[in-house]
Image (spheres, rainbow, N blue to C red):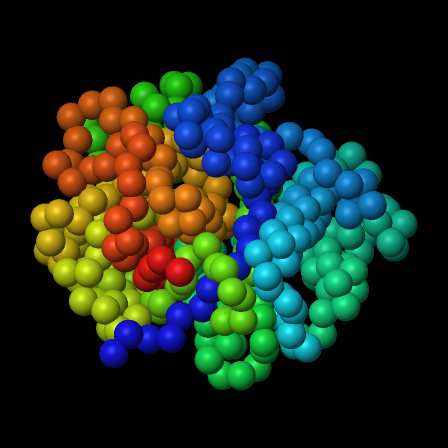
């Protein structure tokens, strides 16, 4: 029996494409990478680098930093969108914020420019709880509010936590926001030194998930808001279930046995009450690194039929770290609503099941996988509303 899912009822987005979900969709439709050659991110602080930085915008009253402004803007857009589609908030609306590093710009300024001295109000703005508290106050929400952190699997972890809250009757609805605006020269440099990020090559040439010649990923930023509920008449898509596991193997590397990755995929299907044969698409983590792409391609070939297509939007959106899974889930949900998904073009010899360009959704199920650094495996099963 298929599990009772939760609807993705509203979507908001702040990405390297700009402030608003339609800019995200239009950028993907145009096959235009969000990254641009940007100064100040090279090894010496002056060189240019390919990065997808969220432009400085938003409401000044939402916070001192880009992080707080993006978080509240994405959540607000998602709520407005959900209400326009018929959602009415219940008495207990919870907030989940998927985040790894918060207010990096302000903390950097606090230590390097302000000398560790700020007015108390400005110091409180550095705390990740502050934009959450202000957002709850703005909307009069009184459900639980907390952070979820599982590296780049945080968005998936947030959706599964929201489903657990709803299944347990703790809340009536959940607003999930996944935010990562952590691009500084220092952070970019260290991901380059780890050997996973590329800054010196155009995105479609550098990041080629499931294709020959991929060197890794371009780094990006984003904040994605989603309203999750069972009480909306017109959701974008439904999250049927999922699973999480941990490799317990290495701070950066995937366990080569893939035992826990396989278990996560299998338990996600079982939790959603579906069979592998029903899955039409794998919306993959697909960062363009050899170990992640090999792991997901192996699971694809072992567990799913040959007609199941795989794709990753990271060559276009860039790798948005803690917000990555949420960006990719939002794209899949919007695709169900609009009957089409825009995947990056293939630029080299590719896996035979790789989907690229514009492809129609036939109503089949989507598996959204995310393999977070440090062994955080997560899989969510999505279906049409």
* Observer-nearest of 158 and 39: 158
Name the spot of residue 360 as percent of width and height, x first. 29, 40
Which residue corresponds to the image point at 74% horizontal and 51% vertical from the top-left? Answer: 126
Vertical comparison of 242 with 116: above or below:
below
Rendered-image quadrant of the C terminus: bottom left
Q: Position of residue 244 (x, y in %)?
A: 35, 66
The residue at 19%/28% (across/down) is 212
Q: Position of residue 368 (x, y in %)?
A: 33, 54
Nearest to the observer: residue 66 or residue 2: 2
Q: Residue furthest bottom?
A: 169
Residue 333 spot, x, y in % from top left:
42, 51
Residue 219 in sight here = no
Left or right, residue 350 beside residue 218: left
Rendered residue at 62%/54% (across/down): 84
**Residue lying furthest right in this view?**
119
At x 42% / y 57%, what residue is drawn?
A: 237
């Amino acid at each position: 029996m298929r599990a009772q899912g939760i609807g993705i009822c509203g979507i908001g987005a702040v990405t390297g494409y700009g402030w608003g979900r339609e800019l995200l969709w239009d950028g993907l439709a145009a096959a235009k990478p969000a990254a641009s050659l940007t100064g100040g991110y090279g090894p010496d602080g002056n060189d240019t680098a390919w990065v997808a930085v969220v432009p400085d915008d938003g409401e000044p009253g939402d916070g001192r930093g880009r992080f707080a402004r993006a978080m509240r803007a994405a959540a607000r857009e998602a709520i407005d969108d959900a209400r326009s589609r018929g959602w009415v908030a219940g008495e207990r609306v919870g907030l989940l914020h998927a985040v790894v590093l918060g207010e990096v710009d302000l903390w950097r300024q606090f230590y390097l420019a302000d000398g560790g001295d700020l007015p108390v109000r400005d110091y409180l703005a550095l705390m990740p709880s502050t934009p959450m508290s202000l957002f709850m106050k703005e909307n009069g929400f009184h459900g639980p509010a907390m952070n979820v952190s599982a590296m780049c699997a945080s968005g998936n972890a947030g959706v599964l936590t929201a489903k657990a809250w709803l299944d347990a009757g703790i809340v009536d609805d959940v607003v999930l926001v996944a935010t990562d605006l952590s691009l500084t020269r220092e952070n970019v440099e260290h991901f380059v030194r780890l050997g996973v990020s590329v800054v010196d090559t155009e995105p479609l040439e550098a990041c080629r998930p499931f294709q020959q010649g991929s060197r890794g990923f371009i780094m990006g930023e984003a904040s994605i808001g989603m309203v999750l509920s069972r009480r909306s008449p017109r959701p974008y898509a439904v999250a049927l279930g999922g699973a999480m596991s941990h490799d317990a193997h290495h701070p950066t590397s995937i366990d080569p046995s893939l035992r826990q990755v396989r278990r996560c995929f299998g338990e996600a299907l079982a939790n959603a009450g579906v069979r592998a044969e029903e899955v039409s698409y794998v919306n993959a983590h697909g960062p363009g690194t050899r170990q992640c792409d090999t792991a997901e391609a192996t699971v694809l070939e072992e567990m799913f039929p040959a007609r199941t297509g795989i794709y990753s939007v990271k060559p276009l959106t860039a790798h948005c770290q803690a917000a990555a899974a949420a960006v990719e889930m939002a794209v899949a949900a919007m695709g169900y609503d609009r009957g089409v998904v825009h995947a990056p073009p293939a630029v080299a010899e590719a896996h035979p099941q790789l989907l690229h360009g514009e492809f129609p959704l036939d109503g089949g199920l989507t598996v959204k996988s995310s393999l977070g650094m440090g062994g955080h495996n997560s899989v969510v099963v999505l279906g049409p509303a």
